[in-house]
Image (spheres, rainbow, N blue to C red):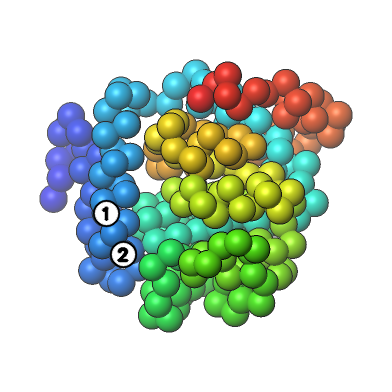
Amino acid sequence: MIPKSHPRYSSLLQRHKLELGVKKGITSIQGLIAYGRGEAFDYLLGEKTTKEAKKAIKASAALLLLAKHPVLSINGNTAALAPREFAKLSKILNAPIEINLFHRTKKRVLLISKSLKKLGIKPLGIKRDFQIKGLESERGKVSSSGIGKADVVLIPLEDGDRAEKLVNLGKKTIAIDLNPLSRTSKCSTITIVDNITRALPSLIEEVKKLRRIDKAYLRKIVESFKNKKYQ
């Protein structure tokens, strides 16, 4: 039991969620290494959402609301750290969630699918019939009605190679990545340099604020945002 009075309560809780994710079979052991690297950057940010990240979150909300076919991509770490927030964002946007794993096994896919169904989400990505050109890993196989069709893809905790290939396909990508120097951060349309457990609740609130706003104003928000400036 982690006392809420602990100065690093939030970070320790995230570690615990990932530990449980591994025990349940949702998160890969390799995902723990990736999280640890991100956590180091979070130290440097002071474990808080920066002004730059807030601007990126607002631009991301506008871009998702302008999209014709937005899709939310979920992996093992995201499924362990913020499944409820991901499901909530999906429902608000009426955007499907697609399971996409680098260390993919049938068991992991079914476990993540089962956890999302408990939250009222029927995910895509169990059956895959679209190949991302030039991407040989398991992440290159996606659903034609999901990521294959999407014009905007939310890619939290993403691999740089797939982020690049999605952009090459003409898709706009929104990354949530604590490392501003990663390939994912550098090549994405919008990069939110923040912890996913802080970024997703903020993104949900921005979507709620902007969803009834005129599309011309939303376009101005997106067009005025310069990704490299705010990274």
| Contact flag, marks 1 and 2 (Cβ < 8 Å) | yes
Is there any visible trace of residue 140 in the rendered image? yes
Q: Nearer the viewer, residue 121 or 125?
A: 125
Left/right of residue 227 with respect to residue 178 in the rendered view: right
Question: Residue 127: where, in percent of width, then height?
Answer: 59, 79
Q: Secondary structure at mark 2?
A: loop
Q: CA distance from mark 1 to mark 2?
A: 7 Å
Left/right of residue 159 with respect to residue 19 in the rendered view: right
Residue at 42% across / 54% down in the picture? 78
The residue wearing badge 1 is: 32
Residue at 72% across / 69% down in the picture? 145
Q: Residues within 10 Å of mark 2 (few under 14, many from 20)?
A: many
Q: Nearer the viewer, residue 12 or 73?
A: 73
The residue wearing badge 2 is: 28
Q: Amino acid at mark 1?
A: Leu
Q: Secondary structure at mark 1?
A: helix
Question: Residue 180: where, in percent of width, then height?
Answer: 44, 31
Question: Residue 197: where, in percent of width, then height?
Answer: 40, 42
Q: Which mark is residue 40?
A: none
Residue at 29% across / 59% down in the picture? 30
Residue at 22% across / 53% down in the picture? 16
Q: Amino acid at mark 2?
A: Ser
Left/right of residue 111 with respect to residue 43 in the rendered view: right
Question: Residue 120: where, in percent of width, then height?
Answer: 56, 67
